[in-house]
Amino acid sequence: MLLEIDNVTLAYGRIQALHGISLTVGQGEVVALIGANGAGKSTTMRAISGLRPVSQGTIRFDGQDITKLRADLRVIRGVSQSPEGRGIFPGMTVRDNLEMGAYTRRNRSEIDEDLDRAFTLFPRLKEREKQPGGTLSGGEQQMLAVGRALMSRPKLLLLDEPSMGLAPMLIQQIFDIIVEINQQGTTVLLVEQNAQQALSRAHRAYVLETGRIVKEGTGAELLHDPAVKDAYLGVA
Amino acid sequence: MDFSGLIDNFGPLTVTGLAQGAIIALFALGYTLVYGVLRLINFAHSEVFLMGTYACLIVWGFFGLDQNSAAPGVGGMLLYLVIGLVVAIIASGVTALAVELVAYRPLRRRNAPPLAFLITAIGASLFISELTGVLTHRNQRGVPPIIQAKPLFTIGDTTVTNLQLLIILLALVMMFALDRFINGSRLGRGIRAVSQNPDSAALMGVNKSRVIALVFLLGGLMAGIAAVMYDLKIGVTRYDAGFLLGIDAFAAAVLGGIGNLRGALLGGLLLGVLQNYAAGLFGSQWLHAASFVLLVVILLFRPTGLLGESLGRARA
């Protein structure tokens, strides 16, 4: 297993956000986390990337315990996150934002290769290369956040709501790109409100409710699960 | 009001103001750099500067130089200047780092509220300045004549001295170098990333603590240079020298747009020049009062300062 989360609890002050979450992500998988607002999806992502310290439980990545490791050191191990709300650097150009994604790397020719790859995946970013990130539209910022997260050549790519705020056509496109990234060899853990898309594209998925995992299965299984359909797919 | 006092001396007042402003600008960079990444006014930065004003005097003292020494020749002048600069830069840089490590970092670890940082900043500032006051018996200390101000050239009826030119050029060169570093290097990009979005910066693999330490260090280096220039220009230093000039420097940073490096340069030069015009117009006792009235007026029309805030513009 590339990522193993065992019984993780996490609190914001007195508010318990995660009540003992356990999940795994295997090498080469696309795994989705679905659930309503406030279920703890983004919190789970922050625990994995290290932005939030966990109260209890362990997080193992690539066979190593990273529970106490600082966020910036997890990037070097191969964890990369496109955060909720995109988190781009508004005052930096699109190119500098992408360069920031490669901050931990030194090999210039490899970085240039990956810049080309990002611009191939997202041609819009190439057009906007010299523009400050803050001037991009929401969809373009989303592409920038995903492109930037890829620039560290992660083993595990964490995507928090990559479809948020996107037009329906762009949603298709971003999921196509996620599948493409995965086929190029990157393992993906994905948080999504758009359960339909997430479940139809993911190998496996977990359903989160109020800080607990209530269901897990393959994407197809959950897509046809009556309870999931009822709660998250908007069809009875 | 003495308009003829301003008009007759317009050239000399401008040059004096630019030299004064260049020192203020270098000093102001420390406030602006730290504010850019931490949203903290590091009041102890005035003592970072203070340590620089003493450090070069102490090392010049090792060479047997004091205020009564004869001026050295050109070779000696350059040698002493370089040694003084290096030592002051080290002293100010180390002081800045020490303040960060001893005073601020422990608070950050404990997630202290902003008010705790503010009072700690004031405390650190008072502590260092008062300790210096006690150790020097609150006496001022004279500066050896490393560089004797001599007229270098004249434009119209305005003479520019070698010292004025040195101060202005050195400030511009340092500003340019710092600007290149922040905007053109990988580490500089890391600094801008932390200032624009600290969480995202961590997700890019930026070590936030290291960036913060670097920013304190850079501010310290600039203050060290300002300190040597101050010594040579004013001729004496005292335990409260940092406090007095620090108010000007802080005001300059705000005037230019705190968080903005070029704003610090603009604010510093402008404040220095305006102070000297005010002195020409109303007499030198009005120097500070007049310049601060102007500061308030400018901020009424541009609350974020002349160049706004760009190091951490529009934090996402």
Image (spheres, helix red, strand yellow):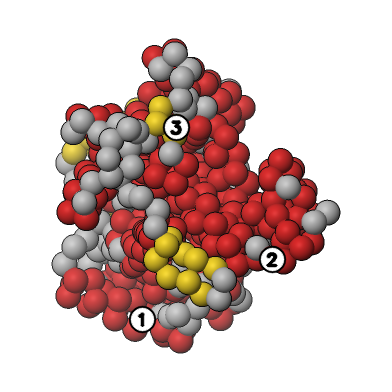
Q: Which residue is mark 3?
A: B237
Q: From the viewer's perspective, is the residue at label 3 or at label 2 nearer?
A: 2
Residue B47 drawn at (x, y percent) = 45, 31
Horizontally, is B8 left or right of A204 in the view?
right
Q: Which residue is mark 2?
A: B8
Residue B45 drawn at (x, y percent) = 47, 36
Whether residue B102 is situated above or below residue B42 in the rendered picture: above
Which one is nearer the viewer's eye here, A161 or A219? A161
Q: Secondary structure at mark 2?
A: helix
How many C-alpha atoms fall within 10 Å of the one at disc 3: few (<14), some, or many (≥20)?
A: many
Q: Which residue is mark 1?
A: A119
Q: Are marks 1 and 3 in contact (CB under 8 Å)?
A: no
Is residue A191 among the parts visible in the rendering? no
Question: Residue drawn 29% across and 81% down?
Answer: A116
Q: Considering the image in quadrants, where does the N terminus of chain B appear?
A: bottom right
Whether residue A167 is situated above or below residue B289 in the rendered picture: below
Q: Secondary structure at mark 3?
A: strand
Horizontally, is B212 left or right of B276 in the view?
left
